Amino acid sequence: MYCMGVIYYYFYLFYRRILKDNEPHLLTVLALSFLESLVLIAIIDSVLIYFFCIDIDKTLMFIFLLLIVGANYFVLFKSGWAKHVVNAQPRFLKSKWLSAALVIFSFLITVSIMFWGPIYLKIALDEWIAAIGVT
């Protein structure tokens, strides 16, 4: 949970200082929810395609996103955890540079799922079809 606090704090700083938004907490919750939904959907989609040859419907992906947004809103925003994190100003190994690198790296890896995920899933689906002998 500590790494999540560092990521939350740096996303918050981005929305507050760089974009100068009026609601940086809300935008941070939405951004984190989107990234978490990308990872969750990729995992579920991979398992379903690899083992059952079933693809997730786009509506179900949107429902996952809404559930994660709702959960994060209550866990991060309503509980006061978000304000506690911002007041604590967490750093990864007490280094601003390492913290920023962690946040950028995790963001790039998570967003890259949108691009390499479908390629991986197509390869897995082709292997599954070849394994059962369907033409």
Image: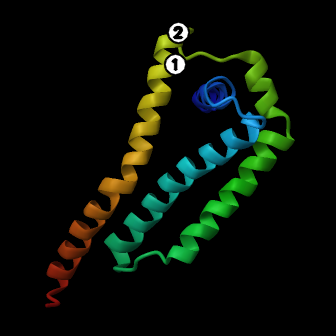
- Gap between marks 2 and 1, in whole Å? 6 Å
Q: Which residue shows up at 74% across the image and 16% down it?
A: 88
Q: Secondary structure at mark 2?
A: loop
In the figure, 32 relative to 57: above or below? above
Q: Amino acid at mark 2?
A: Ser
Q: Which residue is mark 2?
A: 95
Q: Which mark is residue 18?
A: none
Q: Position of residue 53 (x, y in %)?
A: 34, 79
The picture quadrant where one finds residue 42 is bottom left
Left or right, 49 with respect to 93, comes to left
Q: Position of residue 117 (x, y in %)?
A: 34, 58
The picture quadrant where one finds residue 101 is top left
Left or right, 60 with respect to 98, comes to right
Q: Nearer the viewer, residue 48 or 115?
A: 115
Q: Quadrant of the N terminus?
A: top right
Q: Which residue shows up at 38% across the image and 64% down it?
A: 46
In the figure, 75 relative to 118: above or below? above
In the figure, 73 relative to 81: above or below? below
Q: Position of residue 15 (x, y in %)?
A: 65, 32
Q: Are marks 2 and 1 in contact (CB under 8 Å)?
A: yes
Q: Amino acid at mark 1?
A: Ser
Left or right, 133 with respect to 79, comes to left
Q: Which residue is mark 1?
A: 99
Residue most extreme to the top: 94
Q: Position of residue 93 (x, y in %)?
A: 53, 12
The picture quadrant where one finds residue 3 is top right
Q: Which residue shows up at 80% across the image and 41% down it?
A: 77
Q: Secondary structure at mark 1?
A: helix
Q: Quadrant of the C terminus?
A: bottom left
